Image (spheres, helix red, strand yellow):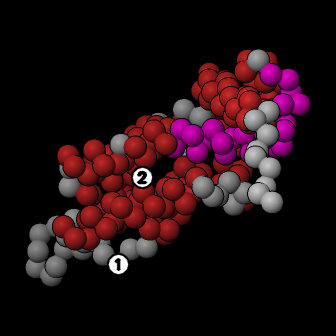
Amino acid sequence: MPPDPPDPADRPVRRDARRNRDKLIAAAQAAFAASDGPVALEAIARQAGVGIGTLYRHFPTREDLVEAVYAAELDAVTAIVPTLLDQHPADVALRAWMGRYAAFVATKRGMMETLRAGLASGRIAPPSRERVTVTVAAFLERGAVAGTLRADVDAEDVTTMLVGVFLAITAGAPQERVDRLLDLLTDALRPRAGAGTDP
């Protein structure tokens, strides 16, 4: 006997659940960007037009919500990679992308404390950290072929250093310091000059 067809009544429920999840992420994005400190989850639920119970069904902890927002906004940051690689040499493209990524992290003021703690503890890892590593690997592979980036560098190591920069930078740090650290990281990824070659 063939299995019973799926109950069409389930479909609206799933669609409603997806809509609620999307509304919660959008509300959290706006709230985190506008706040200088932690944001009450109740305020996010209210802004999304759902109850706090609905929020907790989708995101049992604050870390779960922060990671979802972080991953959603990382979509926009990673989407620019092909354009950067088409327009610039890989080392220049990588430095430009690091600047965009740093700006993205800096705007997360309302979720920064949770994000920093999650990155430091490893709780916030996949898919966000994995996606950063895959993105870095794309730059490294292109640069290794062109000779603008070292071929002996592991993408995960670069991600670790990049995350370390953001963990080390305190709130309100001057942009010049951020730029200087990212310049140093990019320079470390360029091939070393050969003997007798001017730096």
Magenta stretch secondary structure, dominant: helix
In-image side of 118 versus 198 (left or right):
right
Q: Position of residue 61 (x, y in %)?
A: 82, 43
Q: Work out whether 188 lies above or below 115.
A: below
Q: Work out whether 74 lies above or below 94.
A: above
Give the magenta-colored segment's residue range.
Answer: 50-74
Q: Position of residue 38 (x, y in %)?
A: 74, 31
Please name the residue shown 42% across and 57% down the image. Answer: 135
Query: Quick one: SS at disc 2?
Result: helix
Please name the residue shown 15% across and 82% down the image. Answer: 195
Q: As shown in the figure, which amino acid type bears the numbered disc 1? A: Asp
Q: Give the farthest residue toward the bottom.
A: 195
Q: Position of residue 51 (x, y in %)?
A: 85, 23
Query: Quick one: SS at disc 1?
Result: loop
Category of crowding for the residue at label 2, using alpha-carbon neighbours closer than 10 angstroms: few (below 14), some (14–19), many (at least 20): some
Residue annotated with mark 1: 152
